[in-house]
Amino acid sequence: MERYGNDDFTETGGDREEVYSKVVKAGKRTYFMDVRATRNNDYYLTITESKKSYDELGNVSFSKHKLFLYKEDFEKFKEGLEEAIVVVKNALEGKLPE
């Protein structure tokens, strides 16, 4: 599994066991999808967007946005995401929602 920092230690109050990690590179953005275990052997998903940017001197910096997704929300999140993707695809074809 690719490690990209130890942000979870401070953000979640302790280091959680990483069970699975997937990196998706998309232009200036990189998405990290990590499945982590809790102390009670429960699991949750974190999705982190990391965006590379440059200042006026050319120095590189990264801004990160993290989403925590818990098992009880998976189905509703998936349905909402799929619906939003369909709307975007339709809008690109000129079919805006009414």
Image (cartoon, rainbow, N blue to C red):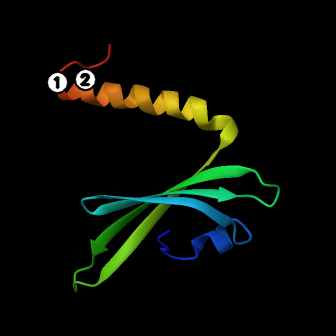
Q: Residues within 10 Å of mark 1 (few under 14, many from 20)?
A: few
Q: Quadrant of the C terminus?
A: top left
Residue 88 is situated, as x and y percent measured from the top left of the image, at: 29, 30
Seen from the viewer's position, the closer of residues 7 and 97 is: 7
Amino acid at circle 2: Asn
- Determine the CA span between mark 1 and mark 2: 5 Å
Residue 63 is situated, as x and y percent measured from the top left of the image, at: 41, 68
14 sits left or right of 49 in the view: right
Q: Return the residue found at the far top.
A: 98
53 sits left or right of 2 in the view: left
Seen from the viewer's position, the closer of residues 94 and 2 is: 2
Question: Number of callouts in the render?
Answer: 2
**Callout 2: helix, strand or loop?**
helix
Q: Return the residue found at the far right.
A: 40
The numbered mark at residue 65 is: none
Amino acid at circle 1: Glu
Compared to residue 86, the image places residue 77 above or below, namely below
- Callouts 1 and 2 close, C-beta under 8 Å: yes
Residue under label 2:
90
**Callout 1: helix, strand or loop?**
loop
Residue 24 is situated, as x and y percent measured from the top left of the image, at: 36, 57
The numbered mark at residue 93 is: 1
Q: Residues within 10 Å of mark 2 (few under 14, many from 20)?
A: few
Residue 36 is situated, as x and y percent measured from the top left of the image, at: 64, 58
* Residue drawn at the location 69% of the way across and 65% of the way down: 12
Residue 51, located in which quarter of the rendered image? bottom left
* Residue drawn at the location 19% of the way across and 29% of the way down: 92
63 sits left or right of 78 in the view: left
* Residue drawn at the location 67% of the way across and 41% of the way down: 71
